[in-house]
Amino acid sequence: MKNKNYCIILAGGIGSKLWPMSTDSLPKQFLDLFATGRTMLQITYDRYSKLVPKENIFISTYKDYVDIVRQQLPEISPYQIVSEPLQLSTAPATALTLVHLIAREPDATVISAPADQLIYDPEAFEQQMREGLRFVDATKDFLAIGIKPTRPATSYGYLQASVDTKDSFFKLKSFTEKPDIDFARLFCESGEFYWSTGIFIWNTQTMLQAMRKDYPYIENMAGIARGNTNTGITIDSDAVQHLITEQYPRIRFQSLDLLILEHHTNVYIAPCTFGWADVGSWKNYYDLHEKDEDLNVICNSQHLLYSCKNNLVKASTDKVVILQDLEGYMVVENDKMLLICKKDDPSLVRRIMNDAQMKFGNDIM
């Protein structure tokens, strides 16, 4: 029997909040962030290959990263890598990949997931994701994977669950993207909210309908994809590629979270318990590592620390890092630069990155 379960791994971003470790030429999804011998993309691919056939996994990435994907995942076929001509966030990237997917299976059940996450209980993850796949296959609704918040974080989206349920999944009542700290505290205290993991399960036809307004070219391209067997036109034909080149730059920057969660009513929440972490910023990176008795995180660096607390140090192994009287800082080195700044403000890192790019040019990236 043909397996209609698919997966899209979203691996096209630049990971600017983890700069300067994550750069334009080698973003975080292609790095071995935790010294495991596997990059984040490879770990994510391993995770989802246990849920869907390997030939049903698509990698959505930026055109400049296609060769990196091929190097890190040599086992996948060329058709499984979908390259976007511009980096316009996860909704346009998903729209483009959707067309390629429809060419193979017009009525698929799809997991879409970022390539920069950690899962702590793989067995629970597989069980709960399989339940989600069965739910979407039967209902054709959107399913957002949610995790109970452990703190009033302001860097995540919050899913509010209603009292209405379907097959133990909660109907989405509201969505708030990155609330301020006071609202985040209220959300946590209420017990009604979940963090959005950015992992969704959906049906291809449901997603196609949801994208018609914002991405009108999708309908035309999907029609070409569905007609492949009769017309001989392939998804990689000059006609389709011309359509992508012409239409893609005209569409707007948008995340998949906002597209699904703010504009559609047929969305349910899967409250999951498999243990989840986002590797989206230096603060996240710090939180995920073991700390010494002074709450310092030292990554692969020779060091001497004097009266230093709550710092993150990541430098090359051939350097000795000596610090005194620092608290709450990050000291991060790459082959081009050394960055020392407060570690808990992702917007600060982004501002510094932009300033460095303006003063020193793209080579610094």
Image (tube, grey):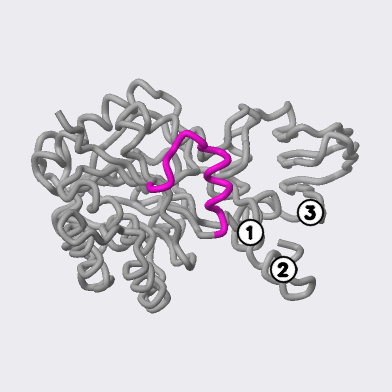
The residue positioned 86% from the left and 33% from the top of the image is 303
The residue positioned 78% from the left and 55% from the top of the image is 339
Q: Are marks 1 and 3 in contact (CB under 8 Å)?
A: no
The residue positioned 29% from the left and 63% from the top of the image is 259
Q: Which residues are magenta?
A: 64-79
Q: Is residue 259 above or below residue 291?
A: below
Residue located beneath label 3 in the image: 340
Q: CA distance from mark 2 to mark 1?
A: 9 Å
Q: Residues within 10 Å of mark 2 (few under 14, many from 20)?
A: few
The residue positioned 47% from the left and 40% from the top of the image is 117
Q: Are marks 2 and 1 in contact (CB under 8 Å)?
A: yes
Q: Earlier in the sequence, mark 3 or mark 2?
A: 3
Q: Amino acid at mark 1?
A: Asp
Q: Earlier in the sequence, mark 1 or mark 3?
A: 1
Which label number is shown at residue 24?
1
Q: Amino acid at mark 2?
A: Asn
